[in-house]
Structure formats: structure tokens, C-alpha cells
Amino acid sequence: QVVESGGGSVHAGGSLRLSCVVSGMQLEYWVVGWFRQAPGKKREGVSCISGDDGTRYDAASVKDRFTISRDPAKNTVYLQMNDLGPEVAGVYYCAAVYHEATVSALCEDRLEPNHWGRGAQVTVSS
């Protein structure tokens, strides 16, 4: 299973860091990603990372502001979000798929993850 934490409310320009703990297998056996769902909009992949070799995939809209990273010793994936604006607010979900998948396939929503977290709310006030 996967469990997110770290959501919250910030002013525009602020930062947040989300955490996703993956349990049940070592992180090296997973590809893990962050997805955002804003009200009335389709879910979209934000950033994904291979738990094995750290290969990353970032959506173009967040490339310069968000950084995904992993800590295999803690079985945890992080999403550091900087310079937040109202356009990136929403519920952020962590998802994990077995390592045979690619980071792009996960983030481009071309496959169904094996596990979803319950989500973490990110609110940005202007």
C-alpha cells in the first residue's frame, strides 16, 4: 500500500513537500508517481520516479518547480513543490506500479497502478 502525507495550505509562492511511503516490498521493486486532481478536471500525472534507478519523468507544467526524489532506506518518495500557484492546487495522489513499468507509462496514465493512496489536499491562496 501507499500512504501520502505533507499536504496543506500555503500562500502563492510558497513551498510544500509531499511524502509517499510504500510498504509491502522494497522501493526498488516499484515505479512511483504523483498525480493531481483539481475540482472538475481530469486526473493528471505530475512526476514519476523509478524506485530502482531513480529515472524521473516530470510533466512540462511543473518541470522547473517540482522535484521528485526517493529514499530507498525509508521506502519513501518525495515531491518538493516550490513557487506554488493556484493552478497547481488539488488533491495529490501517490500511486505505485510494479517495476516492469516505465516512468512515462505511469505518468502519462497509460496503465493502471497497482496501488493508490488516499490523497493529500494542497490548497494555494493568492
Image (cartoon, rainbow, N blue to C red):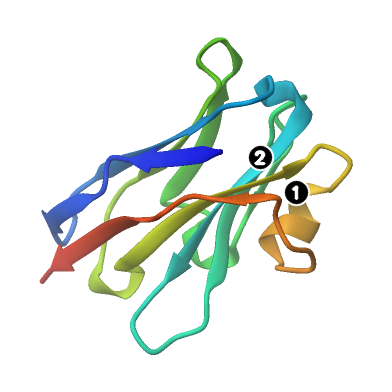
Give residue 56's quadrant in the image: top right
Q: Residues within 10 Å of mark 2 (few under 14, many from 20)?
A: many
- Helix, strand or loop for disc 1: helix
Q: Looking at the picture, how far across and down is residue 111, in whole percent?
A: 79, 64
Q: Nearer the viewer, residue 67 or 103?
A: 103
Secondary structure under the numbered disc 2 in the rendered image: strand
Quadrant in the picture for residue 30? top right
The type of residue carrying mark 1 is Val
Is residue 71 found left or right of 84 in the rendered image? Answer: right
What is the CA distance from the residue labelled 1 to the residue labelled 2?
Answer: 6 Å
In the image, is 105 to the left or to the right of 51? right
Residue 24 drawn above or below residue 122 = above
Q: Which mark is residue 73?
A: none
The residue closer to the viewer here, 91 or 54, is 91
For disc 1, the marked residue is 103
Say what amino acid the circle numbered 2 marks: Ile
Q: Is residue 109 left or right of residue 110?
A: left
Mark 1 touching mark 2, by CB under 8 A? Answer: yes
The local crowd at label 1, few if under 14, some if 14 to 19, many if 20 or more residues have their Cα within 10 Å, is many
**Quadrant of the rendered structure where residue 3 is?**
top left
Q: What residue do we see at 13% from left, 55% from top?
A: 10
- Does label 1 or label 2 sit earlier along the sequence? 2
Q: Horizontal and vertical percent for residue 96?
A: 65, 45
**Quarter of the image containing the C terminus?**
bottom left
- Identify the residue position indicated by label 2 in the image: 49
Residue found at the far right of this picture = 100
Residue sitting at x 45%, y 65%? 36
